[in-house]
Amino acid sequence: MAALALRKLTQKTRPDLADLFFYGTLRHVPLLELVLGRPAAAIAVFEATLADHAVYWVQDQPFPMIVAEAGHTAPGLLVRDLTEDDLARLAFYEGGFDYGTETLNVTAWDETQAQAQVFFPKPGRWTPGKPWSLRDWVDAWGPVSVTAAAEVMAYYGKVGCDRIADSFQAIRTRAWAKLAARQRGSGADSRSPGDVIVHRHTHAYVNYFGMEEIQISHRHYDGTMGPVLDRSALMQGSAVVVLPYDPQRDTVLLVEQFRPPVFLIDDPDPWMWEPVAGMIDPGETPEAAALREAQEEAQIALAHLEPAGRAYSSSGSSTEFLYLFVGLADLTHTTQAGGKDTEGEDIRSQIIPFADFIDRVDRGCFKDLPLLSLAHWLARHRERLRG
């Protein structure tokens, strides 16, 4: 967590510029620098407190909210002399969290008083949880929040904050996947930073998915630098794919749902039979996501997960990285009402004897690549699992 040098609060010299008090995540200096678009040394920042207020975690969310409570004191940062562009950048970022501002009196660390605007959630928008700690938040959510904010602010001036609000959960999911990707290594030959040159990188589109465009050149195997390439990528988070298998009954469970991309390519049958699958939420492990998705989509509890590989699903076009599992379970019932209404899911399931399942695989009856991969993995390991 970056530290700030304590400075005495001087008299305000530009009454036309704004002062804001930050009690929450923008106390994290790397995040504040990113949102304002300049280093902390170029920002007038002072340690301060707000009396008769307390800061709490938003229930079931990785960010805080402030509540008026007599006798409590909320620590924070007083940021002075913010320009119209600064305020627009802050409104764009905070607008995704559905916050507004109020003007209140704050106290600097040297006991100097000042007025500042404070971001407050709209009444009833959030439910407070436990008392919030900046250090705890930085440890658990600092890196993913800074990574997500980098994508958010890349769209400043391009889209409205309503679009960011609608896309923020997906943005945060992509940020969590990016942090995981930075730790990913295959043991391949080492490369040097100069082997890839980025000439231009733009964020072209944001919604449930993101789209980024890049002009890039990379070193060829003969040692020369290749030409500049114009490329784009569908930016996605990481996902789990799990094939439920009952070793006692020797059956598998598949789910079926409508897939818009399959419809868009003019496939006459866009309802796809697939394994259980879903995105890994920020803060979640692949194993926890697999167990959760099995319950949400198929309404079954998995007793054990067998790792069955992990890989990019389509490395030439998408950043999606898949964690594959075979999940052992007692498969005794199906559903006609799987999935979450809030995500627009309408899922049914079926249980198939393994022999029928692998026969349908061999006859090309399935169009989902992860399903085929898991089918072949299960065929190799089935006797061990049954034993």
Image (cartoon, rainbow, N blue to C red):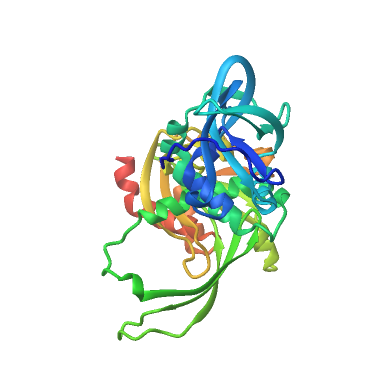
Q: In which quarter of the image is the N terminus?
A: top left
Give the percent coordinates (x, y) of residue 279.
Answer: 53, 47
* Residue at left offset 36%, top offset 80%: 219
Q: In the rendered image, is residue 367 in sight?
A: no
Q: In the rendered image, is residue 27 in sight?
A: yes
Give the percent coordinates (x, y) of residue 3.
Answer: 41, 40
- Determine whether 41 is above or below 342 in the image: below
Query: Left or right: 306 with respect to 24?
Result: left
Q: Which quadrant would residue 211 be assigned to in this image?
A: bottom right
Q: Nearer the viewer, residue 188 or 214?
A: 214
Q: Which quadrant would residue 221 be assigned to in this image?
A: bottom left
Give the percent coordinates (x, y) of residue 370.
Answer: 48, 57
Q: Looking at this rendering, what residue extends furthest in the top direction?
A: 71
* Residue at left offset 58%, top offset 41%: 79
Q: In which quarter of the image is the C terminus?
A: top left
* Residue at left offset 38%, top offset 40%: 305
Q: Which of 193 and 247 is in front in this view?
A: 193
Q: How many marks?
A: 0
* Residue at left offset 30%, top offset 86%: 222
- Determine whether 316 is above or below 151 in the image: below
- Determine whether 301 is above or below 163 in the image: above
Q: Nearer the viewer, residue 220 or 316?
A: 220
Give the percent coordinates (x, y) of residue 54.
Answer: 58, 22
- Determine whether 20 is above or below 310 in the image: above
